[in-house]
Image: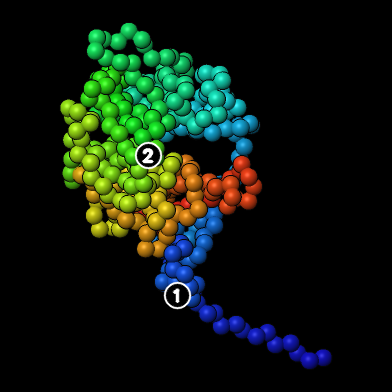
Amino acid sequence: MPRLIQKTLTPLIEIKQIKGIDNVTKDDLRLPPGYVRSANNVDIDTELMARRRKGILRALLSGRAHSGWSDEDRLCFVVLDEDLIQVNPDWTTTTILQDVGSTKMSFVKVGDRVFFSNRQVVGYIKDSIAHGFPTNVRSLREIMVGGELLEYFNSRLYATQDGMILRSVAGNPFEMDLKRDFIMLDGPVTMMLGVNGPGGPSGMYVSGGGECAFLSNLDPSLAEATYKKVLNVPAIPGSAVKTSRMNIGMIRQVAGESVVFSTKIGIYMGFPGGYVKDLTSNRYAVKDIQEGSSIIRWENGYRQYIFMGQAPAEIAGNEGSGRLKPLTGEGKIL
């Protein structure tokens, strides 16, 4: 019988390091060295090597769940089957408030209280008990309102309602002064997070009217704050998350609070003073994503920004449903 001789194939390309995903370059043959079209279920370590993600999928809750939030310690809340529940460290659950509806809920921690709002239902949680806002406010004050987004910054509670940002008086999250404590943006607000730290004045990153901006000089009047446009595109709803102490490209280390958010042209970091770092727009654009949720997690000694996005129904293929698409950006967040 003739002897079979195995032919050796010559590889066309060898990738020793992966810098990230490139979905901007149109020609596959012109991808820059180190970039790939897709990288599923992997993490990129500090040596730019792709490692298979650890862990398995584990079902913790049964039902229709959304609006999960955690303080990264012992507190965790989620809306499950239209009830606001607390997920305990042993994975048991405690019902906090029934029939809050299906609208997405926003949370923010203020001391030993966690404020929550989905615009229709507003209150705070303390010791696993839900409380409403007190109604006995001082003269010339109004009861603080809730909204689609909540933030606590420089001793004030902030809330968004459509294109308006409102806030409480300093030191009292339950009262507001309507003469000073509001500002109008053009269109729904999709991002509202405050940053403090060296490198520039403190302020808030906001997105409304089709753009992203940095608000500073917030006192004494929010209506007279300095508005600095930083991007000509809006932040994708649910993509913004705040973290502290960033390392950008191993060149500049910035201490203090920072904001990471996604747009249709890429992922960005925002720092005090309105300084914005473009992480991915030359290689990676966040395409076909309508809204989502984002977190910062520790992995292999550094932080990762993870944004889980939902495509519109017409792109997902089923009317009224969405396709979940995990997104990862280039660079480390320390």
Q: Is residue 150 left or right of residue 227?
A: right
Question: On the image, which quarter does residue 141 sit in?
Answer: top left
Q: Which residue is mark 2?
A: 187
Quadrant in which the N terminus appears: bottom right
The amino acid at mark 1 is Arg
Q: How is the image coloured?
A: rainbow
Using the image, determine if residue 130 lies above or below residue 238: above
Above-or-below relation of 145 to 216: above
Residue 164: % across, % down: 34, 32
Q: Front-most of 224 and 69?
A: 224
Please state which of residues 224 and 32 is positioned toward the viewer in this rendering: 224
Can you name the residue that lies furthest to the top here?
136
Q: Earlier in the sequence, mark 2 or mark 1?
A: 1
What residue is shown at x 58% (from left), y 52% (from top)? Answer: 315
The residue furthest bottom is 2
Residue 176, given in percent of the width and then of the height, sits at 28, 19
The answer to whether residue 215 shows anywhere in this view is: yes
| Residue at the front extreme of this rendering | 186
Is 275 placed above or below 59 here? below
Distance (Cα) linking label 2 and label 1: 39 Å
Residue hosting label 1: 30
Picture coordinates of residue 313 (x, y %)?
58, 47
- Secondary structure under tag 1 reads helix
Instruction: Name the residue rendered at 57%, 28% in the picture.
Output: 80
What residue is drawn where x is 27% and y is 38%?
204
Residue plotted at (50% across, 72% down): 28
